Image (cartoon, rainbow, N blue to C red):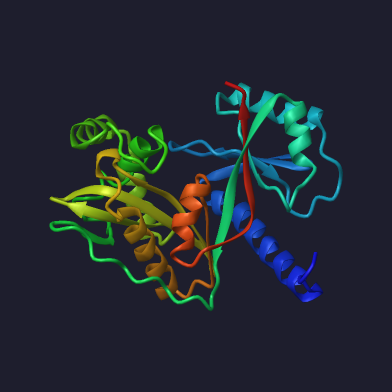
Amino acid sequence: MLGVTSADLADRRELLDRLEQYYDAVPRSGARVEDFGPLSLFIREGQGRPFYARPTPGWSGAVSAAGANRVRARQRELGIPESFEWVAETAPALRAAVEQAGLAVHEHPLMVLGPDVPAPAVPEPADGVVVRTVGPDDPALPSAPAVPHLAFAEPGTGGGAAGPAELGEAVHGRAGDGSVERAVARVLASLTCVAAAVEDSTALCAGQHQPVGVVTEIVGVGTLPTARRRGLAHAVTAVLVADARSRGIKTIFLSAGDDDVARIRARLGFRSVATALIAEPVE
């Protein structure tokens, strides 16, 4: 490629290898792994969001539709979603295999904040809103995991229908299911940092980062649909970056939901380096 040096390519390869090691490591705190040769299936132990299959690190053999179907059969047997996640540039042959197996592939910009990029300033929130990390005793913690679920049910960056009433119902519906206790345990174990934009002890926007060594991924940043267009996701992401930097994290990355979200994250200094892929059954 014009203007791209061999050193640039080597740096990119090293970065993608680092991310691949992270992707393999981060589910292991809550999952067991079943070996399918070129693919590894992560199976949640205990309650929580199901995991997925990923390419096996270091595997150099071919990936076939038959191999993908073997994993799908095992996922159906276990009653978990038939889901695959990977980086296009790291495992370029996998897309054809899963598409031949009948899955639909969704693309998401994979973005990294370089260690030389200054941490973004946390913007001043609207009156009555405080943007902060959320500790295990914080009254906003029960609503923090519920907000992204409502946000992702109404994708996009424009306003939506779900508001405080729906959030209250979601928090009530999750009471007693162990999700808050799991969040507390992960925060106490430094496996997860939660940040939120809080108003009246309720999260209007929330997200997390999950450190492993000197690498972390910012995940699940979502805003209550009726609270959008107030810069809350920008502020929450900035707080998560600041927390990661305070822990000595060198590589901070995220997958943007779409190109519009990627443009917003670019304002914080993130740059696109690859494409994250998710494969699921065709609806």
Q: Position of residue 240 (x, y in %)?
A: 38, 63
Q: Nearer the viewer, residue 163 or 149?
A: 163
Can residue 213 be spotted in the picture? no
Q: Residue at x 50, y 75 (%)?
A: 117
Q: Nearer the viewer, residue 50 or 149?
A: 149
**Quadrant including the N terminus:** bottom right
Q: Residue at x 41, y 40 (%)?
A: 156
Q: Residue at x 18, y 32 (%)?
A: 165
Q: Position of residue 144 (x, y in %)?
A: 29, 47
Can residue 52 be spotted in the picture? yes
Q: Residue at x 76, y 71 (%)?
A: 3
| 29 sits to left or right of 92 | left
| 78 sits to left or right of 197 | right
- Classify residue 195 by image quadrant: bottom left
Q: Position of residue 192 (x, y in %)?
A: 41, 57
Please tell me whether residue 167 is drawn above or below residue 25 in the rendered image: above
Please tell me whether residue 209 is drawn above or below residue 35 in the rendered image: below
Extreme-front residue of the structure: 2
